[in-house]
Image (spheres, helix red, strand yellow):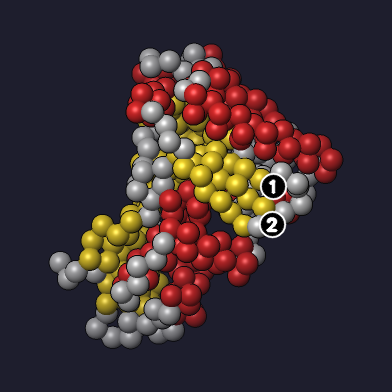
């Protein structure tokens, strides 16, 4: 049995600029500053006695031919790795696996690829896992998403990730231990209780294309500033930047936010946050908020009855194999 463990991600700034149409057409390319979250999706791969394929996630599939699998991410991962029969594949998530704004679908793809490669004895790099996951989701399945999630999940850590016509470059940020400790103490995630697939938001046509492009350019510049603030330890500035990023993002599409999400955002600020933004494409998932060390307790006391509150604990391992063998 092989078990892979792969983190989801939290994007501070730059989301949306990792879309190919933007990154490949802008002279500056796209950039995202993000962190891998210590919340994971686990994938197990085990040999079967027969040649059937059994896949277990929120539902169970048992097929004679992998081509008949409804789970398209697993089906295409099997095709790429050449593991197409005689296996059982199971996914288990620490958090909801869709619609959270944490890139969980790409985390599944990276984790399945890693487990299947290792099942047949191949050790592959984080870069290969990310490239193959992008190929599946964007090139093969035609999903209208960007490339940040796959690389964040594969590499782990805190990164500035650049996107352009020349490819993707991951720059790990070498932060002081004191800054890392403050990151985990001062930033908090609040689950809205709502979810929506990123592809459904990203595929919608904007009302004003020129305004959308201008907002994305602003968001791109914010990703550069976020990197600088992290490296200098200016987390208060980064918290304020989240607010600017949210205001730029929420004007891109009517589906990014709604009255209920706006109300929750305002309440988070009223409870003492210096800034908050909805993660991912929008429409639901998690808010990321910054405040002093007491903010999380205040959020838990006031919102914890309706909203799940979790800390920004960092994963530095990326997608990794945590078990090999028959036991």
Q: Could you tell me how far apart the alpha carbons at marks 2 and 1 are, in whole angstroms?
A: 8 Å
Q: Nearer the viewer, residue 250 or 234?
A: 234
Q: Secondary structure at mark 1?
A: loop
State the image quarter where residue 224 is shown: top right
x, y percentage for residue 45? 31, 69
Q: Is residue 321 left or right of residue 287?
A: left
Residue beneath label 2, please? 165
**Crowd rating for badge 2 (residues with CA inside 10 Å; few <14, some 14–19, many 20+):** some
Residue in the picture at 34% in, 48% down: 317
Q: Nearer the viewer, residue 268 or 219?
A: 219
Query: Could you say which disc has been placed on residue 29 in the image?
Result: 1
Residue in the picture at 51% in, 44% down: 171
Residue in the picture at 58% in, 54% down: 168
Q: Is residue 68 left or right of residue 209?
A: left
State the image quarter where residue 15 is shown: top right
**Crowd rating for badge 1 (residues with CA inside 10 Å; few <14, some 14–19, many 20+):** many
x, y percentage for residue 53? 37, 78
Q: Is residue 21 left or right of residue 317?
A: right
């Amino acid at each position: 049995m092989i078990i892979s463990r792969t983190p989801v991600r939290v994007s501070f700034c730059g989301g949306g600029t990792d879309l190919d149409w933007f990154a490949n057409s802008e002279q500056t390319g796209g950039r995202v500053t993000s962190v891998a979250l210590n919340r994971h999706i686990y994938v197990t791969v085990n040999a079967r006695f027969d040649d059937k394929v059994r896949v277990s996630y929120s539902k169970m599939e048992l097929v004679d031919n992998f081509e008949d699998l409804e789970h398209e991410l697993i089906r295409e991962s099997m095709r790429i790795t050449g593991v197409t029969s005689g296996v059982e594949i199971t996914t288990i998530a620490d958090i909801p696996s869709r619609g959270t704004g944490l890139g969980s679908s790409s985390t599944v793809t990276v984790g399945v690829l890693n487990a299947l490669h290792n099942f047949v004895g191949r050790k592959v790099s984080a870069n290969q896992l990310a490239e193959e996951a992008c190929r599946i989701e964007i090139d093969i399945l035609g999903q209208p998403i960007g490339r940040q999630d796959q690389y964040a999940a594969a590499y782990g850590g805190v990164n500035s990730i650049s996107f352009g016509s020349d490819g993707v470059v991951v720059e790990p940020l070498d932060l002081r231990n004191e800054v890392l400790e403050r990151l985990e103490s001062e930033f908090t995630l609040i689950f809205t209780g709502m979810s929506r697939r990123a592809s459904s938001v990203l595929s919608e046509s904007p009302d004003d294309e020129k305004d959308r492009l201008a907002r994305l350019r602003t968001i791109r510049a914010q990703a550069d500033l976020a990197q600088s603030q992290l490296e200098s330890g200016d987390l208060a500035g980064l918290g304020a930047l989240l607010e600017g990023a949210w205001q730029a993002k929420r004007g891109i599409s009517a589906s990014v936010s709604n009255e209920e999400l706006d109300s929750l955002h305002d309440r988070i600020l009223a409870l003492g946050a210096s800034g908050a933004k909805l993660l991912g494409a929008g429409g639901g998932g998690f808010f990321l908020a910054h405040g002093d060390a007491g903010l999380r307790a205040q959020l838990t006391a006031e919102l914890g009855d309706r909203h799940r509150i979790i800390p920004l604990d960092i994963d530095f391992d990326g997608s990794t194999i945590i078990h090999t063998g028959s036991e």
